[in-house]
Amino acid sequence: MKETKKLNIAVIFGGVSSEYGISLQSAYAVITNMDQKKYCPVMIGITKEGRWLHFAGDCTKIKEDTWWKDANCVPAMLSPNHDEQAVLRLEEKRTEAISIDAVFPVLHGRNGEDGTLQGLIELAGLPLIGCGTLSSALCMDKDRAHKLVQTIGIRVAKSLVINSLSDMEHARMFAGYIGYPLYVKPVKAGSSYGMTKVMAIEELDQAVTLAFEYDNQVILEENIEGFEVGCAILGKKDLIVGEVDEIELSQGFFDYTEKYTLKSSKIHVPARISPEKAKEIKEAGKAIYRILGCSGFARVDMFLTPEGEIVFNEVNTIPGFTEHSRYPKMMQAAGYSFPTLLDMLVRCGIDGE
């Protein structure tokens, strides 16, 4: 029986981002769960300083963040030539081309999830696993994403965008209008950093100053009563949706610490809601996914109010991808194991369906 040729999948991880460490954990899980009979992961790490390196060592070093110290690391780049479709290893005396069948960016936040890397991959003519340039950029921009989603009749939080600390008086007036508590967030950053739940006007200035450390625009959003639910979505034309999940909080909000430690929160998969409401949330998730031009995969996060109304929160175009992350867990609850999920994602990226 003729042996099927393995596909070379470039897995890019790390990056100049506050979410560098989470990217390493996600990439390790992706690499170790890929079907080794079908795929050969070509590991491309980007250091915190922005150096691209081809890493051919033990992938446990990725998880431990010692990968970049490996003696086998060689500077690398994606070939910009469409007819080449390769990763270039830039050795001292020669350049070696490694043929690539698809690229799987496993980076979170800025410089990985915001369309910058996706543009480079598309410019090189390489099949991309995940959302494209435009949808990645739109979903990272909380303000523009909300404005687009609002056009299809889905409620979003009342919000105000400010461009500098000189706009603080305007911010205080808006905060007085929507009331406390409210949320202050960077407009174009991941959901884990720079976000503050502001309980009173005395906390507003500090929260805005913190958010400006992560972006040049800051958004103030009204607090939505209820709880957060999520949809894991896969596909381009015909969409597959995982089971809806639910975040149960005993205090505060789902910040970086809660997201990765669950100290005072729980995630329920499936969510503790009626089948009818779960179906409604899935349909809203698919509508949001489509209006924002998503493809490949994404996690759509929404709120469910005590009155049963769905309110859009945000879309993560490269959500956490560890075995314990929400996206794989929602898909697992729908009957797709982690290796099967990865196989579906690769096929979607290559076949474009």
Image (cartoon, rainbow, N blue to C red):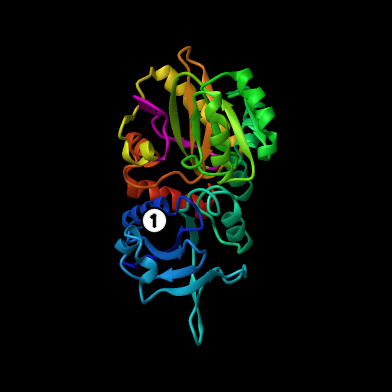
Q: Residue at x 54, y 58 (%)?
A: 127
Q: Is residue 291 visible?
A: no
The residue lying furthest to the bottom in this view is 93
Q: Residues within 10 Å of mark 1 (few under 14, many from 20)?
A: many
Q: Is 69 drawn above or below residue 259 in the view shown?
A: below
Q: Is 173 drawn above or below residue 319 in the view shown?
A: above
- In the picture, the quarter occupied by the N terminus is bottom left
- Residue bearing the label numbered 1: 24
In which image quadrant can residue 59 be found? Answer: bottom left
| Magenta region, main secondary structure | loop
Side of 339 relative to 182 (left or right): left
Q: Residue at x 42, y 48 (%)?
A: 344
Q: Magenta segment range?
A: 236-256
Residue 187 among those drawn in magenta: no
Location of residue 57 in the rendering, given as x and y in whole percent from the top left corner? 33, 70
Location of residue 317 in the rendering, given as x and y in whole percent from the top left corner? 51, 44
Residue 246 among those drawn in magenta: yes
Q: Amino acid at mark 1?
A: Leu
The residue lying furthest to the top in this view is 307
Location of residue 4 in the rendering, given as x and y in whole percent from the top left corner? 37, 65
Q: Residue at x 33, y 34 (%)?
A: 333
The residue lying furthest to the front in this view is 202
